[in-house]
Amino acid sequence: MDKDINKFLFTTEDGNTIEYEKLLSFHSNKNKKFYMIVTDNTKDEEGNLNTFAYYFMDDDLNIKPVLDEQELEMITNVYNNIKEEC
């Protein structure tokens, strides 16, 4: 299996390109959004992996950052539950 299959290039508003690696993706039937947790493989001051949450809609494939606190909490819970199972 190709180890680069989960890598993505995103272009920021200022034109910079950042490579992200997908950690998890899932669909919510409740709000019809596809969520994706990605990392740029950098770490914060405490040594934790920096992660970012994005979404797109069933009818709109433009990827947008998740900014809603309730959605971020739900995504964090899903991610943490999956990490615990592994």
Image (spheres, rainbow, N blue to C red):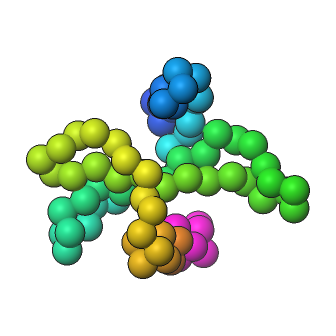
Viewer-side residue, 11 vs 1: 11
- Magenta range: 78-86
Asked whether residue 4 appears in the rendered view, the answer is no
**Residue 48 locus on image (x, y percent):** 78, 59
Horizontal side of residue 20 vs 6, given as left or right: right
Residue at 42%, 78% (x, y): give it: 70
Viewer-side residue, 32 vs 6: 32
Asked whether residue 34 appears in the rendered view, the answer is yes
Residue at 25%, 59% (x, y): give it: 33
**Residue 8 locus on image (x, y percent):** 48, 30
Horizontal side of residue 42 vs 5, given as left or right: right
Kindly give the residue lying farthest to the front in the view shown.
Answer: 14
Residue at 28%, 39% (x, y): give it: 62
Q: Quadrant of the C terminus?
A: bottom right
User: Is residue 81 within the magenta segment?
Assistant: yes
Number of disc labels: 0
Above or below, 32 against 17 in this view is: below
Viewer-side residue, 66 vs 78: 66
**Majority secondary structure of magenta residues:** helix
Above or below, 19 against 56 in this view is: above
User: Is residue 58 within the magenta segment?
Assistant: no
Above or below, 64 against 81 in this view is: above
